[in-house]
């Protein structure tokens, strides 16, 4: 995979051991502002915008989770980031897990918050919507694209929609079983995007994993930054 730094929006701040931040879907590196400000006192922090997000270059073709993992690995090599600790949120957790499962030396310790990547049993309502979408799409594809799917999905460009479908339909629990690094999951108690049952299912897969809750929703790390940062700091130092 060819990667050019001119295509990427990133920041590096501080000195010391490398610490990487991977943001969530439709988010950006700025979501970690409180964490970057705090941890850059002790680490060399790197935060980047994935292709298609923030100020990085738009996607030229649909990316899967594996594509984003390979891209991230190439970016870290270009930036001289070696075996960092990583703090990942939501979609960023998918990328971190995928990358760590294929390369045991990619990261040191891994923190996942609001982790995405687990597909739980989908009920009748979901299956009915998918069936209705596929039926309507055969006769009125433009109408189907406008009326079906989440608001998040409908806001995407055609290339990003194809990428989104690749991403959300991959269950990463088998990848999680191959991650040898220590993992710490911090789950927001009011998280409705990636709820507790998904975080627990994830935690059961990692060979070394501790799960702890924190007040807040899907962005609990931004809602409750002081406690989040202290929890992470303790995990890194143990």
Image (tube, rainbow, N blue to C red):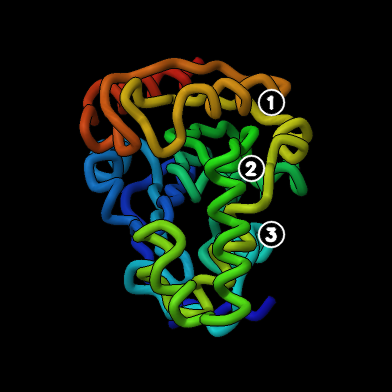
How far is mark 2 from mark 1, CA to CA?
10 Å
Q: Which residue is mark 3?
A: 66
Mark drawn on residue 47: none
Mark drawn on residue 206: 1
Say what secondary structure mark 3 lies in: helix
Left/right of residue 2 with respect to residue 56 in the rendered view: right
Say what secondary structure mark 2 lies in: helix
Quick one: 94 or 86, which is closer to the camera? 94
- Quarter of the image for residue 36 reads top left
Looking at the image, is mark 2 or mark 1 earlier in the sequence? 2
How packed mark 3 is, by other alpha carbons closer than 10 Å (few <14, some 14-19, many 20 or more), is some
- Quarter of the image for residue 232 reads top left
Q: Is residue 125 above or below residue 186?
A: below
How far is mark 2 from mark 3, CA to CA?
10 Å
What residue do we see at 55% from left, 45% from top?
126
Quick one: 38 or 210, which is closer to the camera? 210
Q: Which residue is mark 2?
A: 97
């Amino acid at each position: 995979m060819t990667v050019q730094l001119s295509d990427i929006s990133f920041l590096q701040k501080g000195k010391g051991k490398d610490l990487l931040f991977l943001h969530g879907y439709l988010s950006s590196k700025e979501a970690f502002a409180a964490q970057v400000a705090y941890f850059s006192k002790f680490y060399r922090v790197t935060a980047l915008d994935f292709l298609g997000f923030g100020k990085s270059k738009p996607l030229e073709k649909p990316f899967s989770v594996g594509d984003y993992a390979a891209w991230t690995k190439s970016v870290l090599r270009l930036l001289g980031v070696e075996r960092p600790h990583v703090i990942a949120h939501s979609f960023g957790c998918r990328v971190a897990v995928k990358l760590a499962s294929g390369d045991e030396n990619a990261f040191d310790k891994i923190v996942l918050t609001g982790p995405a990547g687990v597909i739980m049993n989908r009920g009748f309502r979901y299956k009915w919507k998918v069936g209705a979408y596929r039926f309507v799409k055969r006769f009125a594809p433009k109408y189907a694209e406008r009326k079906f799917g989440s608001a998040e999905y409908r806001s995407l460009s055609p290339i990003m929609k194809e990428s989104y479908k690749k991403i959300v339909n991959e269950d990463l629990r088998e990848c999680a079983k191959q991650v040898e690094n220590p993992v710490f999951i911090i789950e927001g108690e009011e998280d409705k995007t990636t709820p507790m049952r998904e975080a627990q299912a994830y935690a059961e897969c990692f060979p070394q994993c501790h799960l702890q809750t924190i007040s807040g929703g899907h962005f609990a790390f931004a809602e409750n930054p002081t406690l989040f940062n202290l929890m992470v700091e303790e995990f890194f130092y143990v």
